[in-house]
Image (cartoon, rainbow, N blue to C red):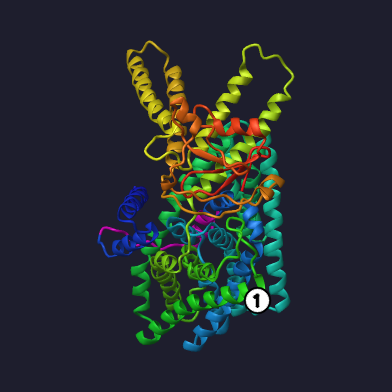
Amino acid sequence: MEIALFLVALVVVVLAGTALADRVSLPAPLLLIVVGVVGTYLPFVPEVHLEHDLVLLGLLPPLLYAAAIQTSLVDFNANRRAILFLSVGLVAFTAFGVGALVHFLVPSISWPIAIAIGAVVAPPDAVAATAIGRSIGLPRRVVTILEGESLFNDATALVLLGTAIAAASEGVQAVDVGLDFLWASAGGALLGFIVFVIVAKLRKLVTDPLMDTAISLVTPFAAFLLAEELESSGVISVVVAGLLLGHKAPIIQTAQSRIAERINWRTIAFLLENTVFLLIGLQARWILEGVADSELSPARITAVCAGTLLACIVLRLAWVFVARYALVRPGPDPSTGQVPPWPYTFILGWAGMRGVVTLAAAFIIPSTAEHHEVLLLIAFTVVAGTLFIQGLSLPWVARRLNVPSPDPLDDALARAALLQQASKAGFIALDELEHDDPHGVHDLIRQRVDQRNFAAWEQLSTTEGQDSPSDVYARARLVMIDAERQKVLKIRSTGTVPSEVVREVLGILDVEESMLDIATSDHESDAPRVRRVPTGRSCDHLDTAGPAVIFTAEDGLVCQQCVELGSHWVSLRRCLACGNIACCDSSPHKHATEHFHDSTHAVMQSAQPGEDWRWCFVHHLTG
């Protein structure tokens, strides 16, 4: 009962702390650590000792898997050199650098144990980095590298830690270290691939979302335990399986299964990620009390803890700049067409927050090691110090360096263009169907797909002071759905309709309402801005049409045909060949498309204030 009450209280505090953090605009991880530290000094809060088995076997596999299935394998591959230099090279560099410092400051700590604590504090945490990075809107390339680094660096650190502990007790040969690391990395990747193949084959046979979800929940633990049982890297096995399963999900899973898996793992990750930080805070009191009996002086303990924290920060900054300019030399960013500037590199170096794996790994060091209580305090200091120093200052640093956040207008344009290209492929498949259509179903399908695409284009700017058709539709339909639900609930209370039927109808209304909620939440009413963003694809028409012209509200552009008809327009488009101004396809008369069919002028541009994107009617590409 005491354990059950504690677990329930833990979750309640996590939920309350996360809600409070959102209300006061603070990163939830930092607030939860403070709550945990304060809780350790409350008489009714039990003392919690975080065991490394609990973290490495219970928390780490699902956290890694939840992050891996959401990580783009395409983006990961595009940044693989930077990720490998950070997840392998930087971890080893930090481990030996910190080890040298610890041995210098406390000579009684042997070299193997000093390198072991260096390996413990070396890997930044995936949860901490991405939670804070996404909340402040770091560039996607930076977040991708941080995620990729954090997925694999734990494996490097744990291999180094195990090797250092073995060296402290019995000694190891360099060739053994190399072979261990090779089997940990290659073996873990191979075993993760085997788990992926097995799960992928199972999922092709399973169409029930409940069964698919159950398979998903077992997968990270199966991959981790299989690799660990064969003395390989469970971390790499879980990450490889998760990356491949996430990448192949649209092929091997049904739509319902993908939706269920996405919701379930987001919920699991949310609870575990935030619980982890509360647990970190709950370790503070007993770690500090253990140091009180240390043979080292308080000044020496303070020096080694502060020195290790500083070394972790400085070594990472030094490594990322050397790696960028001497080794990686990154190419142009697909989202901007430009080589990432040096502030991106500094942000990447500054976002080195440590997390629960560092604290858990410290418990792997044998309790018989020299000054074991100080080693635990070093790990706690690095975790708390990086989270508060770097985590709290990261938004300020990003603003000072003018590091841009992802632009919602760019995302809206890319989303609309991608949907348009997908629809073009769908219409081709529709035309190839060989059956009669006496009921006009094909026309109805085309109409619904067009309405979906129009709603996506309306996420861009529309005529000022007027609601877009999709906004009007969403508001009206939400009012209708609420009335429909009330009627269904009223009928349910009479008991005249079977409860299964009532649940099914309510589910239909819930699905439609959730789709409307997503559509309206995606609509960002942002101030007009001038953006020069290549899409990465082009065509002969876009290449020869010339650049777009930037218009402002003062230009007073109108669709003359709509004016003559006494009609309204949603957005304006301009033909790049003749300069004709016409209304978009969301408008009642679609004069821009009509102009294309009449003139065969293939390229038009947005004539909305501040927008400079172009569109090819022939190839359905933006530029």
User: Residue 519, relative to residue 143: is it above or below?
Assistant: above
Q: Is residue 131 left or right of residue 216?
A: left
Front in this rendered view, residue 508 or 47 = 508
Q: Is residue 38 shown in magenta?
A: no
Q: What is the x, y in percent for residue 611?
A: 50, 48
Q: What is the x, y in percent for residue 447?
A: 57, 24
Circle 1 packing at 10 Å, graded few (<14), some (14-19), many (20+), is: few
Q: Mark 1: which secondary structure?
A: helix
Q: Is residue 45 shown in magenta?
A: yes
- Segment colored magenta: 44-61
Q: What is the x, y in percent for residue 184?
A: 67, 64
Residue at the disc numbered 1 = 326
Residue displayed at 42% across by 23% down = 506
User: Residue 319, relative to residue 355: is it above or below?
Assistant: below
Q: What is the x, y in percent for residue 177?
A: 68, 74
What amino acid is found at the position of numbered circle 1 in the picture? Ala
Dividing the picture into quarters, in which one does residue 471 lie? top left
Dividing the picture into quarters, in which one does residue 497 lie? top left
Front in this rendered view, residue 273 or 434 = 434
